[in-house]
Amino acid sequence: MPTLVKTVKIGIHKEVHAAKWRAILATQELYNQTIAFYMEFFVGHLAVLDARKEVHRKDDMPYERSWKNQELLTFAEVYTLDTKAHPHPLQPLIESLPSARTMPVSLRRAAINHAIGKVKSWYSLRKLWESTDRKKRPPQLGQPNEPITFYADMVAYPDVDLAVQRQVRHDFVAVELFYEGKWQSVPLPVSLHRQAQAVLSESQAESARIHVATSQIKSRKNPKEKWTAEEKATVRPQMWHALSLSLYARRDKQYPGGLRFALHVPFEKWVDAPQKAKTQFATNPGMPVVTVDLGVNRLAVMGAFLNDKLIATKFVHGGELNHKRHLLLNAIYKKRGQSGRLQKDVQDNVNLWEKVRNMDENAARQVARQIVNFALQNEAKVVVFEYLRGYRAPKEKMSKSGRKNHKRAYWLRGKIVEWVRDLAFREGILTVERNPAYTSQMCPHCQHEHREVGQRVKHSFTCLNPNHSYQADADFVGMMNLYCKWNGTFAYPRKKKCADESKPAQAIA
Ligand SMILES: [Zn+2]
């Protein structure tokens, strides 16, 4: 069972109070100083990273393993923090960083964990470098510049207000910061977009459920008894569940002080790993499936099948996008023509290119979302695409911008597949690809009796069987034929051409 993680970014409002603004920076500085301190500590105790520990397995067989991060953390705390039992640690943190005295425990632990990670990776790179010929520069440890990581006990999310008419525009996420000389919870104004709000409320409900489930199991069990697999499964997040968040500072001229702050909240969810598409098909050949034909003028033609019957279709048109993109590309090529030769290594028409890229990326995401939603509506567990071959330039005469437009439209299909694969997997839906040969040239109804290639004129397909009068959209035919390829009933044409056609490698998920 895999865990899925997605990160939602929540922007901190531009007009955050100057005192809070300074508090964020002060905390970040202190946090990074703490990391630097512990990095130095571990570099001084590199032997612990190599040390082995003897432990006993369940059957009392002793075996050795290296120290776990949790043990390294305890080790660092013992040697750097003063307690009543040990008032004089070897290398006190307070001496180097007096303001770290009242630092919240979880923030300090986050810093130690960061330091452990950084030193560990540096140390293994260094060992690798030592074992090679040492011609290259040795790996450097460097100075930490990490976003502040807040563990769950340092964050207070707003209680989600489900009323539609909200009086207050700003929501606050409170985090513990070093504010005016002491550690306290500081509410930061954030712009919560609708999705963030939805996912946060889902997370709060899920946390409550896990909390209740955990205490219920604990109350009826003896503490030494092992949890069953079922009990473990019930306390895993089945909905998106927030993990420790980080506060990032990015340079941005439009923000006061030239810094833009944002909270990055990772969300975790467990899903059951779906069985391979082939296995699913073998157990249930009539299973619901969505097939998608991706095109240029129609970005996507989707069809949902159940028990070998088409139950729903959906078309996503792309004519407008193509037209808009063509206009922008025209403008770019016109400007290029006016400015003479392009300079090497200097990007031309930066804003226009960015606009084109954003438009395409946005379209890809939106289409992918629609495809996944369509699959969800029809309860399909598999989405079938045609395998996308490498780009081949059109043979007909075209303007420069027209060619570029054609190429970008082709590239967009790959992007859509990529996004669908990602989004669908989160819902437990698999994406498979099938051989694209003849998908828009065979009649989906009479290919078996009349195995000759049909006629395709631009966007419409006509069946050439004299006993069958059939005309349909070529992309629709492609979508229907993809289903035949999925269930293995597709009949390739009888012509010799078929044998010559080299089949592209099939990607089978
Ligand atoms: Zn036909």
Image: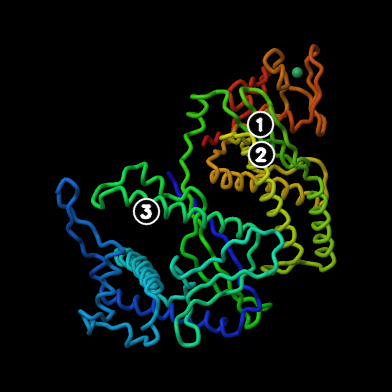
Q: Which residue is mark 3?
A: 215
Image spot of residue 334 (x, y percent): 84, 61
Q: Nearer the viewer, mark 3 or mark 1?
A: 3
| N-terminal-most mark, 3 or 2 | 3
**Quarter of the rendered structure image containing ligand 1:** top right
Q: Secondary structure at mark 3?
A: helix
184, above or below 337, in the image: below
Give the quarter of the figure containing the N terminus: top left
Closer to the chain start, of discs 3 and 1, is: 3
In the rendered structure, which amino acid carries the disc numbered 3?
Ser
Q: Secondary structure at mark 1?
A: strand
- For residue 67, side relative to residue 261 (left or right): left
Q: Report the residue at 46% width, 40% height from top.
A: 273
Residue at image mark 1: 304
Closer to the camera in the image, 425 or 349: 425
Q: Is residue 499 above or below residue 391?
A: above
Question: Could you tell me residue 212's position as x and y percent?
Answer: 42, 53
Tell which of 485 and 252 is nearer to you. 252
Q: Are marks 2 and 1 in contact (CB under 8 Å)?
A: yes
Tell me if residue 137 can be seen.
no
- Residue occupied by mark 2: 374
Q: Toward which corner of the image does residue 373 lie, by quadrant?
A: top right
Say whether disc 2 or disc 1 marks the residue closer to the N-terminus.
1
Mark 3 vs mark 2: in front: 3
Where residue 449 sits in the image (x, y, percent)? 69, 12
